[in-house]
Amino acid sequence: MFQALELTQTQYDLVYNSFSLTIAAMGASFVFFLLMRNRVGVSHRIAVTVTTLVVGIAAYHYLRIFDSWSAAFTFRDGVYVQDGIPFNEGYRYVDWLLTVPLLLAELVLVLKLAKGTTRSLIIRLSIAAVLMIGLGYPGEIAAADSVTRTVFGVLSTIPFLYILYVLFVELGRSLDRQSPRVRKFLDAMRYILLITWGIYPLAYIAPSLIDNEAVATVVRQVGYSFGDILAKPLFGLLVLAIAIVKTQEDEEVEHQGEPAPVLVDKA
């Protein structure tokens, strides 16, 4: 017999407030990146534009997630009972399907590599990202079936490992052509991706590790939310920092190429 999910007020509010925090973080980041876009050189604005799109798309989807969560529960007898409209986990996966390829693209674009290299990296990383998200979704919606969840979780990990290989091995070969300041930010970006993306698998397998369904639900939703905050606004700040550094370096090169001023003897 179907048993409706019940959450204490604390559990419900924890998820509710994490969604609210994520909406605020994405919305504020969208406005900030939009205002900062003109602070970088024209040739570097595409990366900042993509960053702005990522947090804008995420803000919209978290509004939908927030509304879906609110509609799914009814407060009755001191607890929140999931007996309303079913909570739509698909909003999150649609968001990832759009934002993860863009997030990887902004990393490649901001480095200003050769056109052929840039195109190849973006195509391969985007395909791997779509496979990673697409393979994870069947396991996500099969929360009660640990076998299905595990199988699709393992399948989703394969493109994830390929993405890490590209970022740490193939992309690492371009570091020698970058300035020390850019290399420092690029290293930070790659490790932020590694660390923050590690949150998602932990949240994903929570239903398989935690017997209490209510606790597992809270861990999963809060974990995904904080992972998104770290992987999108924080990552975007580093993209912006690289774009600003590269703009400064371009200006320095231009100034070095200018002829020395002619001194006029007024004597």
Image (tube, rainbow, N blue to C red):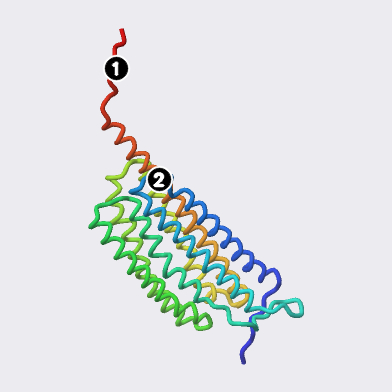
Q: Is residue 155 left or right of residue 233?
A: left
Q: Residue at the spot x=27%, y=30% of the render?
A: 258
Spatial separation of the CA atoms under disc 1 and disc 2? 33 Å
Expressed as whole percent of the image width and height from the top left, the position of residue 144 reads 53, 83
Q: Residue furthest right?
A: 77
The disc at residue 99 is none
Percent x, y for residue 36? 47, 48
Q: Residue at x 38, y 75 (%)?
A: 155
Number of dots carrying numbers: 2
Label 1 close to label 2 by CB (< 8 Å)? no
Q: Secondary structure at mark 2?
A: loop
Residue 168 lies in quadrant:
bottom left
Instruction: Classify residue 170 as left or right of residue 142.
Output: left
Q: Residue furthest left?
A: 116
- Which residue is the site of mark 2? 40
Checking the image for residue 263, the label placed there is: 1
Residue at x 58% of width, y 69% of height: 219
The C terminus, quarter of image: top left
In the image, what residue type sits under mark 2?
Answer: Val
Residue 109: x and y in percent read 33, 54
Q: Secondary structure at mark 1?
A: loop
